[in-house]
Image (tube, rainbow, N blue to C red):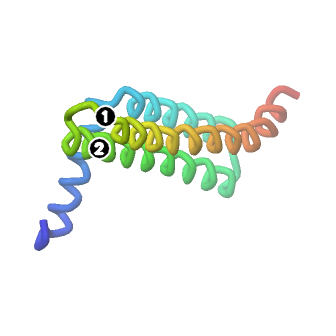
């Protein structure tokens, strides 16, 4: 991979996304939620700034989920037998996804509540 072209790097990244989509239920759920949220941004006519913030949060959650998947796979390779530290590493990695998801949800509530209220009125 040291002398890999940009095209080669992009293909490798797409393989990684494809692997996560096929093998990680939470990643699929997050993708489906992202599609719904982006649809809501369009339907509710969010501002450019609101949209940029929400899309940034979506990509951050997806990125952290991919990192979590990579960390879990590395731990599985290095410690195939049960080891207390392996569990801690996986739990902490999963916690990063949870914390970011909670933060993204809060941002979503802050942005979507006024947008929904204007439609309801």
Q: Which residue is mark 1?
A: 21
Residue 58's x, y, as percent?
A: 53, 45
- Specify the label residue 120 is tagged with: none
Q: Position of residue 77 (x, y in %)?
A: 19, 42
Secondary-structure class at tag 2: helix
* Extreme-right residue of the structure: 121
User: Looking at the picture, how far across and down is residue 38, in whole percent?
Assistant: 55, 39
Q: In the visual, does 20 lie left or right of 109?
A: left
Q: Residue furthest front?
A: 84
How many residues crowd around disc 2 within 10 Å: few (fewer than 14), some, or many (20 or more)? some
Q: Which residue is mark 2?
A: 17
Residue at 17% x, 63% y: name it: 7
Distance in Å between CA atoms under marks 1 and 2: 6 Å
Q: Label 1's element?
A: helix
Q: Residue at x 73, y 37 (%)?
A: 109
Could you say which is closer to the camera, residue 87 or residue 8?
A: 87
- Left or right of 39 on screen, residue 50: right
Q: Quadrant of the C terminus?
A: top right
Q: Quadrant of the N terminus?
A: bottom left
Label 1: few (<14), some (14–19) or many (≥20) C-alpha neighbours in 10 Å = some
| Side (left or right) of 77 relative to 112 | left
Front residue of this view, candidates 61 and 44: 61
| Horizontal arrangement in the rendering, residue 108 relative to residue 91 (left or right) | right
- Quarter of the rendering containing residue 116: top right
Mark 1 touches mark 2? (CB < 8 Å): yes
The image quadrant of residue 107 is top right
Q: Give the percent coordinates (x, y) of residue 52.
A: 60, 55
Q: Residue at x 37, y 45 (%)?
A: 66
């Amino acid at each position: 991979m040291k002398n890999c072209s940009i095209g080669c790097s992009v293909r490798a990244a797409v393989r990684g996304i494809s692997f996560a989509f096929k093998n990680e239920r939470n990643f699929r759920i997050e993708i489906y939620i992202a599609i719904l949220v982006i649809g809501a941004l369009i339907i509710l006519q969010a501002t450019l700034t609101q949209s940029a913030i929400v899309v940034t949060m979506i990509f951050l959650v997806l990125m952290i989920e991919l990192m979590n998947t990579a960390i879990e796979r590395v731990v599985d390779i290095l410690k195939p037998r049960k080891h207390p530290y392996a569990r801690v590493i996986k739990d902490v990695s999963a916690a990063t996804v949870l914390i970011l998801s909670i933060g993204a949800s809060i941002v979503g509530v802050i942005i979507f509540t006024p947008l929904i209220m204007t439609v309801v009125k």
